[in-house]
């Protein structure tokens, strides 16, 4: 399967899970933080994305907790999810570096 | 907020508890659109997220929230979130095929008058100016009835095709192995019909847009079937084969 560029929402959700498991609401907060408030995931978008990522084997359910009588499901990155996120991050970094170098050759390698 | 009764314009229309309960009920109605399997596992969680992200004074779901939830529900119901990418693209192509077919149908219906007058003129040319009135009238009537029959057949076939594409898209999204076989059969049949139509000379009267649409539908069908048959698609159908 060819690796296609990831959608930004997908990239941010995986990044939110990169340093530990999170529940749905936690992911929305993390994604907002990572994107400096630019990306505010809506609940429908988040849960369809989570469903999709689980089907693709990039994330999995880590554990479930009951908080205030409500079920809270924690998600974590799978090893495959980690690999895909790392590959995508490297791709974005290479692109960004090339752009910055061409804009300002004196900048050198960032 | 201890002074009671409140004075003047700050008098609340409804108390906060009941308005948040109303908001929750409205969210629940939207989440009810999701497939049962999803709701069983996720309803409480998604409701909690919705309530947590709602504005303090919010009394009903915003249009954007409702749209987002309904879009998610539609995608899940169509099976678009749980199938492999190849099947996902194939299913999208099939919906596109239904749309192209619909455009072809509308184009055909809009051009009925033009087709009638074109065949009428062609028939007149064929009999020539020296034929008797009775012969000319007889031929024109026969041509007109042939055109009518052809149109009725075409419209019926196209309507069935639209319904067929929609059903196949939906069932393939769900991973039905039968639907995959169905898609292959329908695509092969459609290719045969299209090629036969061209060899019969339907290109002479049909408008260019209609021909372009039918070729587009065929191309979409072939692409979709190809995607259904690539390696990544097989495990998805195999997993659903047992549930048949």
Image (spheres, rainbow, N blue to C red):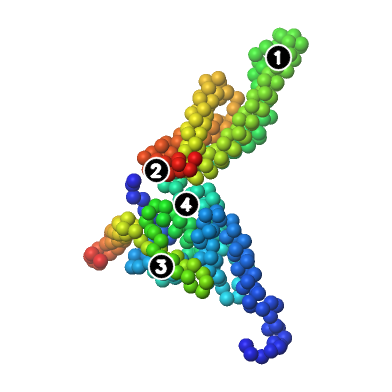
Q: Earlier in the sequence, mark 2 or mark 4?
A: 4
Q: CA–CA distance between discs 4 and 3?
A: 21 Å
Which numbered disc, 1 or 4, marks the residue that appears first in the sequence?
A: 4
Q: Position of residue A81 (x, y in %)?
A: 34, 57
Mark 2 to mark 3: distance in Å?
30 Å
A11 relative to B141, above or below: below
Task: Tell me the residue at 47%/68% (across/down).
Answer: A72
Image height check: is A45 above or below A25? above
> Which residue is nearer to you in this view: B141 or A84?
A84
Q: Residue at label 3?
A: A22
**Which residue carries the number 4 mark?**
B81
Judged from the image, the secondary structure of the residue bearing numbered disc 4 is: loop
Q: Which residue is mark 2?
A: B235
| Residue A17 position within the rendered picture, expressed as x and y whole percent measured from the top left | 37, 65
Please report the residue visible at 63 percent of the width from the left and 37 percent of the height from the top.
B106
Real-space CA distance between mark 2 and mark 4, rounded to the nearest whole angstrom: 16 Å
* Spatial separation of the CA atoms under disc 3 and disc 1: 77 Å
Label 2 – label 1 distance at C-alpha? 59 Å
Q: Residues within 10 Å of mark 3 (few under 14, many from 20)?
A: many
Determine whether label 3 and label 1 are within 8 Å by CB: no
The residue positioned 44% from the left and 48% from the top of the image is B83
Q: Secondary structure at mark 2?
A: helix
List the residue tagged with mark 1: B139
Q: Residues within 10 Å of mark 1 (few under 14, many from 20)?
A: some
């Amino acid at each position: 399967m060819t690796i296609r560029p990831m959608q930004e929402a997908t990239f941010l959700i995986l990044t939110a899970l990169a340093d530990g498991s999170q529940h749905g609401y936690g992911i929305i907060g993390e994604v907002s933080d990572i994107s400096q408030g630019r990306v505010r995931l809506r609940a429908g978008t988040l849960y369809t994305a989570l469903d999709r990522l689980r089907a693709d084997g990039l994330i999995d359910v880590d554990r479930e907790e009951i908080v205030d009588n409500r079920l809270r499901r924690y998600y974590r990155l799978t090893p495959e999810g980690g690999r895909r996120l790392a590959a995508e991050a490297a791709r974005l970094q290479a692109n960004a570096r090339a752009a910055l170098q061409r804009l300002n050759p004196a900048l050198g390698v960032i | 907020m201890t002074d009671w009764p409140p004075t003047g314009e700050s008098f609340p229309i409804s108390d906060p508890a009941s308005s948040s309960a109303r908001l929750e009920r409205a969210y629940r109605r939207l989440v009810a659109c999701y497939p049962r399997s999803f709701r069983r596992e996720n309803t409480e969680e998604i409701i909690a997220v919705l309530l947590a992200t709602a504005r303090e004074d919010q009394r009903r779901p915003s249009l954007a929230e409702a749209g987002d939830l309904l879009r998610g529900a539609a995608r899940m119901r169509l099976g678009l979130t749980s199938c492999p990418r190849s099947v996902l693209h194939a299913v999208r192509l099939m919906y596109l095929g239904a749309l192209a077919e619909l455009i072809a149908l509308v184009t055909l219906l809009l051009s009925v008058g033009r087709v009638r007058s074109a065949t009428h003129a062609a028939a007149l040319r064929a009999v020539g100016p020296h034929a008797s009135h009775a012969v000319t009238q007889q031929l024109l009537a026969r041509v007109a009835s042939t055109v009518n029959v052809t149109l009725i057949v075409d419209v019926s076939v196209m309507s069935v095709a639209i319904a067929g594409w929609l059903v196949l898209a939906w069932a393939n999204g769900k991973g039905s192995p039968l639907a995959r076989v169905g898609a292959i059969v329908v695509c092969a049949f459609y290719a045969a019909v299209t090629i036969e139509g061209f060899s019969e000379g339907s290109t002479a009267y049909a408008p260019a847009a209609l021909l372009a649409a039918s070729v587009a539908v065929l191309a979409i069908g072939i692409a979709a079937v190809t995607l259904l048959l690539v390696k990544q698609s097989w495990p998805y159908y195999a997993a659903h084969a047992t549930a048949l």
